[in-house]
Amino acid sequence: MTKLQIGLLFGGCSGEHEVSIVSAKAINAALNAERNTDKYEILPFYIQKDGVWQGSEIANQVLKSGQALEKPTATNINTKSSLWEFPPQASQVDVWFPVLHGPNGEDGTIQGLLTLMQVPFVGSGVLGSAVGMDKIAMKTAFAQAGLPQVKYMTLTRTQIWSNPCVFPKLCDEIENSLNYPCFVKPANLGSSVGIAKVRSRQELETALDNAASYDRRVIVEAGVVAREVECAVLGNDNPKVSAIGEISFSSDFYDYETKYTQGKADLSIPAALPDTISNQIREMAIKAFTTVDASGLARVDFFYVESTGEVLINEINTFPGFTDTSMYPRLWGHSGIPFPELADKLIELALERHKTPKIEALIN
């Protein structure tokens, strides 16, 4: 039996570089599990923080150590030409498995590159990835689809860093529209990077300035007293949904440290919810998935306002984490799909998604 060559792509130019390495280690182990060894040969590729691609030798070293390559050697220093040079093994890849989080990874950029390579890849395409990553575009799409959300405002860096006469009026508008507490977020970052919960004018001003330093577009969301629940989606045109999980934590909000530090958050699967609410969340998760044109996988996050019975969509993550503390693989594990089978299914979905007979006929 001929094995498929799987290009395991990880690292990347983002603040979630280290998380990508941990996720890639977990997926590498799943693809090397007994059920998958006869089907797949893993070719790891590591993208340094400076954007240079490394082949299997260095990629395996990074996977083994679990640590980022911090100091490029003379042979892998970022030069203009090296950013467009791929390791020779890249031409052998049958299916790409991009385990990249955040900007330059799950925002449509790498998906565009892989599309141009004309090789199937796991996960959403350019559109689903880009809309799913950009919080403003995402919320605009959700609003058009009729999915209920918290109240929010969108701002630009130009507005925030405007003259001293304009900025106070902007803060007045936020206070009058959203009140406190509220959340200030860069539009295009993941894993809660750059996000702040604010309760006063001083905190608001500081948070806006900080968010604008990360992104030229910023979103401010009204705070809500609610339970935070999540649902995993798996599939392409006929997606399935998992059991629902609930996150509880003692920190001020579900920030980067809480997400990726063992013991900082408790994950309850299944969440103790009324059946009607659980069914509503599952239906909304599928609607969110199809609205942004996601494929393969996604995790959809919600607020359940217990006092009113409202379910509000928070966001969709088109390539969720696969770390020890990550909800996505745990939700499917509880729903009867163990990790090795899940990894196998994601590759099958990638192959299914990229079968376009008419386009193939035109090319050939």
Image (cartoon, rainbow, N blue to C red):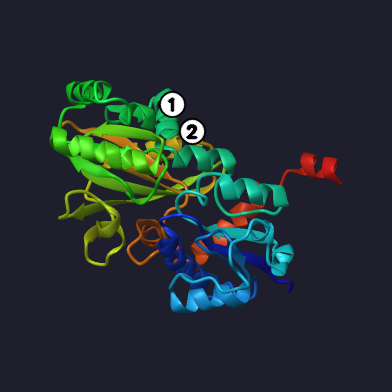
- Whether residue 192 sits left or right of residue 81 in the image: it is left
- The answer to which quarter of the image holds residue 358 is top right
Residue at point 36%, 51% (across, down): 191
Q: Looking at the image, which is closer to me, 69 or 229? A: 69
* Earlier residue among tags 1 and 2: 1
Neighbours of disc 1 within 10 Å: few (<14), some (14-19), many (20+)? some
Measured as percent of width and height from the top left, residue 340 is found at 50, 68
Measured as percent of width and height from the top left, residue 108 is found at 55, 44
**Relative to 321, is 219 above or below?**
above
Neighbours of disc 2 within 10 Å: few (<14), some (14-19), many (20+)? some
Write down the residue under mark 1.
Answer: 145
Amino acid type at mark 2? Thr
Amino acid type at mark 1? Ala
Which secondary structure lies at badge 1? loop
Q: Looking at the image, which is closer to me, 156 or 287? A: 156
Which quadrant would the N terminus be assigned to in this image?
bottom right
Measured as percent of width and height from the top left, residue 243 is found at 35, 52
Measure the C-alpha gap from mark 1 to mark 2. Answer: 7 Å
Measured as percent of width and height from the top left, residue 218 is found at 35, 34
- The answer to which quarter of the image holds residue 300 is top left
- Whether residue 98 sits left or right of residue 318 in the image: it is right
Question: Does residue 276 appear in the picture of this structure?
Answer: no
Which secondary structure lies at badge 2? helix
Do the residues under discs 1 and 2 have CB atoms within 8 angstroms? yes
Write down the residue under mark 2.
Answer: 291
Residue at point 34%, 44% (across, down): 301
- The answer to which quarter of the image holds residue 137 is top left
Residue at point 22%, 40% (across, down): 206
- Whether residue 150 sits left or right of residue 190 in the image: it is left
